Image: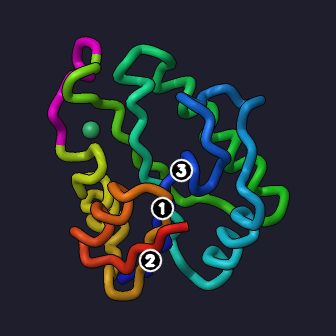
Amino acid sequence: MNKAAFFDRDGTINVEVNYLYKIEDLKFIEGIPELIKKYNDNGYKVIIVTNQAGIARGYYTEEDMHKLHRHINAELKKIGAHIDAFYFCPHHPEHGIGKYKVDCNCRKPKPGMIEQAIKDFDIDVSQSILFGDKPWDIEAGEKCGILSIVV
Ligand SMILES: [Zn+2]
């Protein structure tokens, strides 16, 4: 089994910008790239779990988000760090457009994204940790039995 460090994205690894998708608006929170590297070096899977209602609302596309995520990993690579996987929820139960208007099981505080990652990476929750800045991050982590810390 693997141990994992889960991170929320907006407000936890990058400075919160409303509906961030532009590469030029990405700014890491101080110390976070080094923290990610520490988990990489200690054998943790580093996994992002992020609600992306901006996709549901039509403000940007999944591809815009993937571009930003590739950029995040390119920046981290400069210090020898990386994110192993990004899980995202593109849904919103009320404001979603078309296929994105879903009362899904992945939008935090629901645990769907974390549960999927646990399956995909064979994660031992007792050896794992989650960092987030919002109550719903912590709630989602705790539902999965993961020590969850507010940053
Ligand atoms: Zn969802």
Relative placement, left or right, of 109 versus 26 is left
Can you give x and y, in whole percent of width and height, for residue 56 in the image?
35, 23
Q: Residue at x 67, y 46 (%)?
A: 15
Residue 63, horizontal then vertical, whole percent:
52, 24
Ligand 1 closer than 8 Å to label 3 CB? no
The quadrant of the picture occupied by the C terminus is: bottom right
Q: Residue at the location (61% across, 77% down)?
A: 39
Tell me where residue 43 appears, x and y as whole percent.
Answer: 57, 82
**Circles 3, 2 touching at the beta carbon (< 8 Å):** no
Of helix, strand and loop, which one carries label 1? strand
Work out whether residue 89 or residue 12 is closer to the camera in this orientation and state it: 12
Mark 2 element type: strand
* Residue furthest out toward the front: 135
- The residue depicted at 78 percent of the width and 49 percent of the height is 75
Is 29 left or right of 151, judged from the image as shown?
A: right
Which residue position is annotated with label 3?
A: 9
What residue would you read off at disc 2?
Answer: 129
The image quarter in which residue 78 lies? bottom right
Question: Could you tell me the amino acid type at mark 1?
Answer: Gly
Mark 1 CB near ligand 1 (8 Å cut)? no
131 falls in the magenta region: no
Location of residue 125 (image quadrant): bottom left
